């Protein structure tokens, strides 16, 4: 199984809502990532978890809160988002952090109204 | 962040021709590079990688060339097919994280 799954595929939320994005992999990977991608732009790294511990936070606003409940799951909790947060949110995993191929999920298309 | 850029934002090629997508990187300490393909509505898909101790690596119909002297990376696709139409990103690994280039949109003309 070389698949990273993400749910939901699409999400529309208001600025006062609280929602969560979910990501799952069963490849035994120990590093997991959240990226944000705006239209026609490259993915931008948000967070990195290595061995279930937050390793990198790329100065992401606190309205985005990551969580890694176990080695297979990665969540991104959303609260009080702004319309400019609308984007494709990609999850990825790799064998370890560093010089390893990253496997990406299909992404969650988020729209903040 | 690091500067990883592509020379051409769009590229159109005839089906059956070879495609070359270029990428410039700025950090000479980068030691691992990946090319990704991203189709519309999908996440990036790994194509091929190369480490800094190599200057060429071949896969199925794809070749990556690395020129460390001028900090340049290229992806060559042989006999380009309609299914190759996508956005292609290069990514460099520095300090345990990847930085993505701006992307090149490849369109294959039947």
Image: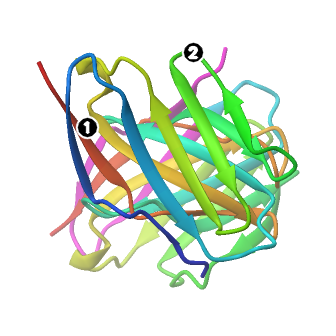
Answer left or right for A21 relative to B29. Answer: left
Q: Quadrant of residue B107?
A: top left
Q: Are marks 1 and 2 on the same chain?
A: yes
At a point 70% along the width and 76% down the height, the residue shown is B27
Answer left or right for A51 relative to A36. Answer: right
- Main secondary structure along the magenta-highlighted residues: strand
Residues at marks 1 and 2, CA–CA distance in whole angstroms: 22 Å
Residue that carries the numbered disc 1 in the rendered image: B40
On screen, A81 above or below B38?
below
Specify the quadrant that holds the C terminus of chain A: bottom left
The magenta stretch spans residue A22: yes
Residue that carries the numbered disc 2 in the rendered image: B60
Numbered disc 2: what chain? B
Instruction: Mark yes or no: residue B36 visible.
Output: yes
Q: Which residues are magenta?
A: A1-23
Numbered disc 1: what chain? B
At a point 50% along the width and 59% down the height, the residue shown is B23
How far across and down, in percent of the image, does residue B22 sit? 45, 53
């Amino acid at each position: 199984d070389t698949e990273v799954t993400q749910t939901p595929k699409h999400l529309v939320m208001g600025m006062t809502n609280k929602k969560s994005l979910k990501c799952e992999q069963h490849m035994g990977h120990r590093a997991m990532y959240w990226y944000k991608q705006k239209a026609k732009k490259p993915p931008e790294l948000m967070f990195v978890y290595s061995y279930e511990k937050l390793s990198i936070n790329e100065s992401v606003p606190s309205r985005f809160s990551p969580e890694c409940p176990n080695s297979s799951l990665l969540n991104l909790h959303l609260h009080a988002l702004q319309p400019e947060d609308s984007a494709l949110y990609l999850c990825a995993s790799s064998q370890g952090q560093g010089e390893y191929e990253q496997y990406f999920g299909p992404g969650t298309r988020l729209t903040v109204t | 962040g690091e500067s990883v850029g592509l020379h051409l934002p769009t590229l159109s090629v005839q089906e059956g021709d070879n495609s070359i997508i270029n990428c410039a990187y700025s950090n000479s300490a980068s030691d691992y590079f990946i090319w990704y393909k991203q189709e519309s509505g999908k996440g990036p898909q790994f194509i091929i990688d190369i480490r800094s101790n190599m200057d060429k690596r071949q896969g199925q119909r794809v070749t990556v060339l690395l020129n460390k002297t001028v900090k340049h990376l290229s992806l060559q696709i042989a006999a380009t097919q309609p299914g190759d139409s996508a956005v292609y990103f290069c990514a460099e690994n520095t300090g345990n994280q990847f930085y993505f280039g701006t992307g090149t949109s490849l369109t294959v003309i039947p």
